[in-house]
Image (cartoon, rainbow, N blue to C red):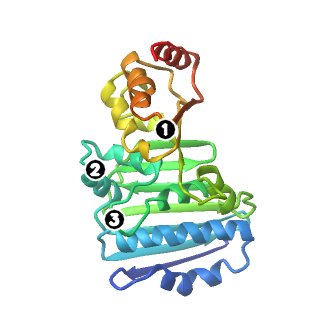
Amino acid sequence: MWKDARKVIYNIEGLTEDKVYRDIVAEFIRDVPKCAKECFEYAFMEIMNNAIEHSGGTKAEVSLLIDDEQLAFTIKDDGIGIYTKVAEALNLDEKRYAILELAKGKFTTDPQSHTGEGIFFSSKCSDYFYLGSDGIEFITSPSAEKLEQTDMNYKGTSVAFRVNLNHKQTLQDLFKQYTDAPESYGFIKTIIPIKLLEYGDQSPIFVSRSQARRLLTRIERFKIVQLDFSGIETIGQGFADEVFRVFKSNHPDVELSPINCSEAVHQMIRHILEYR
């Protein structure tokens, strides 16, 4: 059971995230340890701003929760749904692939006003992060990331964020992992879970060049890209060739590194690299 919980429903028109923070957040987290507090504040401001400026909704339900071990918020809006909005912006044939673009980072439907870093870093500074919309749920924690279909096909977007009160990683340390700090704090690195390419009941075997091209969309915006093959048993020659030979030859300035590979995946990558 949560030791304290609060819920407020706001009209989005004319709302600002700092007003919500002053209304209900500041006092609620006053005595929270510094590291957990700064992660919570960062994520809350980013997600609240998304609900206000991107959702297209009319109302936002904000909940705050705390117990002796963790601090959490949920923000639910009644808007278009984040996966629908991203899929339409990128002309994706499946809404499910929208989370792959959000997981890469540097994507926003409003590039004039936003950098596309909010959801990426909010999920990374959490101990649990949930993003649900359009019958799709993305859940990430320090131990795993998963993408699931759900019957909860509610209107709008729901985000849940939790951070342990004894959370140790500071925001500065987190940003350093993905930027060129201390030079400019440019967002130069990303880690992409290959499993986010899975769809439905398909076998987690990636064989086609079209799958590879979907994976590679926009990653030339980064200097360092790690491809996380956790849970992937094998890949096909066409997939590997498109990623590790064709893309690399066209984008020599991008440092492309596979991580957490099975022996079969390693063998296929080595086979392709022999042709470079």
Q: Residue at x 52, y 19 (%)?
A: 265
Q: Quick one: 252 or 84, which is closer to the camera? A: 252
Mark 1 burial class by Cα count in 10 Å: few <14, some 14-19, many 20+: few
Q: Residue at x 45, y 25 (%)?
A: 244
Q: Do tag 3 and tag 2 residues touch (Cβ < 8 Å)?
A: no
Label 3: which residue? 110
Kind of residue sitting beneath label 2: Leu
Kind of residue sitting beneath label 3: Asp
Q: Is residue 270 above or below residue 150?
A: above
* Distance from the alpha carbon under mark 2 to that under mark 1: 25 Å
Kind of residue sitting beneath label 1: Asp
> Callout 2: helix, strand or loop?
helix
Q: Quadrant of the N terminus?
A: bottom right
Q: Is residue 181 above or below residue 257?
A: below
Q: Is residue 217 above or below residue 12?
A: above
Of mark 3 and mark 2, the one earlier in the sequence is 2
Q: Quick one: 86 or 255, which is closer to the camera? A: 255
Q: Which mark is residue 90?
A: 2
* Distance from the alpha carbon under mark 3 to that under mark 2: 12 Å
Q: Quadrant of residue 205?
A: top left
> Callout 1: helix, strand or loop?
loop
Where residue 253 sits in the image (x, y, percent)?
49, 38
- Dot in front, 1 or 3: 1
Mark 2 burial class by Cα count in 10 Å: few <14, some 14-19, many 20+: few
Q: Residue at x 27, y 55 (%)?
A: 89
Where residue 214 sits in the image (x, y, percent)?
34, 36
Label 1: which residue? 253
Where residue 181 sits in the image (x, y, percent)?
64, 56
Q: Is residue 203 visible?
A: no
- Dot in front, 2 or 1: 1
> Callout 3: helix, strand or loop?
loop
